[in-house]
Amino acid sequence: MHPPIRNDADQPRNRNYEKDIIYVTRHNKWVLNSIGIWPAVLKGIGQFLPKIAIGVSNLVLFFTLIQCVLHIVFDQKDPLLRLKLLGLTCFSFISLMKYWALMARKSKIEYCINQLYADWKQVEFQRDRKLMLKYGKIGRTLTMYSTVFMYSGGLSYVTIMHYTIGSYVDEFNRTIKLLAYPTYSALYDVQKSPVYELVYVIQCMCGYVFDTVTAGACGLAALFATHVCGQIDVIMSQLDDLIDGKFSEENSSLNVRLVEIVQHHIRTLKYKFSAMVETVLQEVCFLEFVGTTFVICLLEYYCIVQDWEQKNKIGLSTYSLLLISLTFNMFLLCYTGDLLVEKSTNVGISCCMIDWYRLPAKTVQDLILIIARSNSPAKISAGKIVDLSLVSFANVLKTSFAYLNFIRKTVTNNDSNTDKSTNSVCFLQAGYDHSAMYQERQIYENLAEDKFEANLPKKLTLTMKIKPNFQIFQAMKIMSLRQLKRRA
């Protein structure tokens, strides 16, 4: 059950509150309306639009994610390709979980937005309005950057990278058209038309929902956190005016001004807005914190180890843009959390910076309570486990690079072991069931006719394309079966 919102909003003190609210919330409203999360008062058939958007979004997310998992488990056998698809699957799963977390907290999101509207309506002085607009502009800018980065990275992955890869002809002379997200071959033949076009449209919708969920969650964090910072600045300006009362209502006493400050402070930080914001964002921030750490690690591996070494410019550009997008979103959450802690602590500092010696002793004692309350500042936590701050962001980057080093060494060791087993197979195949010169000549003839490749693993077929003449082959230091029997 939510605490009641103030009822004194019937006659707003801020004449420009409608323009201010539109200016601050416009981009968040655009992003979250498309996935049915932003609260909207609709009538008639329109009231079912958010439910339809939620149902369609969940349907396309399930359709794509389940096929990715089935493809990795049953269709794909190459461990390197599995590793490359693991990042996509992890990002998809984390986005789905964040979407469910936002749906579960939709009522609390609506409460926070209504409280934000009420605060804008009750701004009485122009200087307080400017302070709120200052931080509202910061939240608006952060939301714009997050949205642009996410949509740019997602759009480039689904379109540019998809059309650059194009198609290829398989061993059965069929043209295979690739998709951005893998599909499970046992369900249907994706190469048939219009199945291919339909699946591609669904995957584009899925990519849009993934990017919208991430951008919307970060936009909500920026909107709510900067609004709290604006309210704290208003409280600090009221503290500066506590003694003289130049900007307060006429004939207001010192005690009345102090009561208003305390009520505003409690309403902003503890019992209403700030506490509800932390409740709304804790699951989303936890999923973003864990998922971003892992996905950033895999994107670094794709960029540095794979695409850079293979000189794949399109893949390198796409993965780099996705890496920048996810890193910026993590920075946005940590920056807003750090800003919130800093601003909450500054309330106590402002109490010490005013001319408190001009106040009565009883009022000074009341200020001590405000200072004590500011020692436990408002914050944004990842599941009440990790407090989001710039230190947390640095730890995320360090952890991702540590995981990158671990994956790189693991893959390198596996490649070296594969090379050793490849040499052993070539060695044994060349000497097995052959003796003396006749057997060596038979091996050479099989090599020359490309018949020997059928007996080798697929990874070795590329190495057997060279056809040396018999004298060079005879000079090779390959141990024959006769030498093996002598050693035995």
Image (spheres, helix red, strand yellow):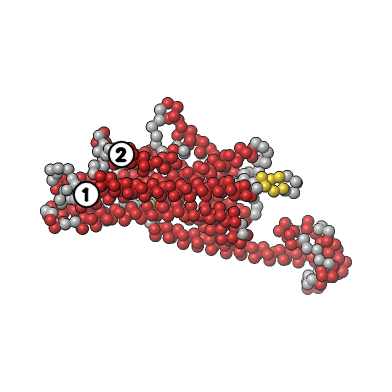
Tell which tag, 2 or 1, sits nearer the viewer.
Answer: 2
Residue 1 visible at all: no
> Which label number is shown at residue 17?
2
Q: In front here: 28 or 373?
A: 28
Q: Is residue 475 left or right of residue 116?
A: right
Q: CA distance from mark 2 to mark 1?
A: 20 Å
Tell me the residue that label 1 is attached to: 238
Q: Is residue 147 left or right of residue 487?
A: left
**Up-down: is 335 above or below 53?**
below
Quarter of the picture holding the C terminus: bottom right
Percent x, y for residue 16?
A: 30, 39
Percent x, y for residue 338?
A: 36, 55
Q: Which three-letter amino acid code belongs to the residue tagged 2?
A: Tyr
Q: Residues within 10 Å of mark 1 (few under 14, many from 20)?
A: many
Nearer the N terminus, badge 2 or badge 1?
A: 2
Q: Are marks 2 and 1 in contact (CB under 8 Å)?
A: no
Percent x, y for residue 2?
A: 32, 39
> Which label number is shown at residue 34?
none
**Element marked by disc 2:** helix
Quarter-of-image position of residue 115: top left
Residue found at x 48% / y 52% = 325
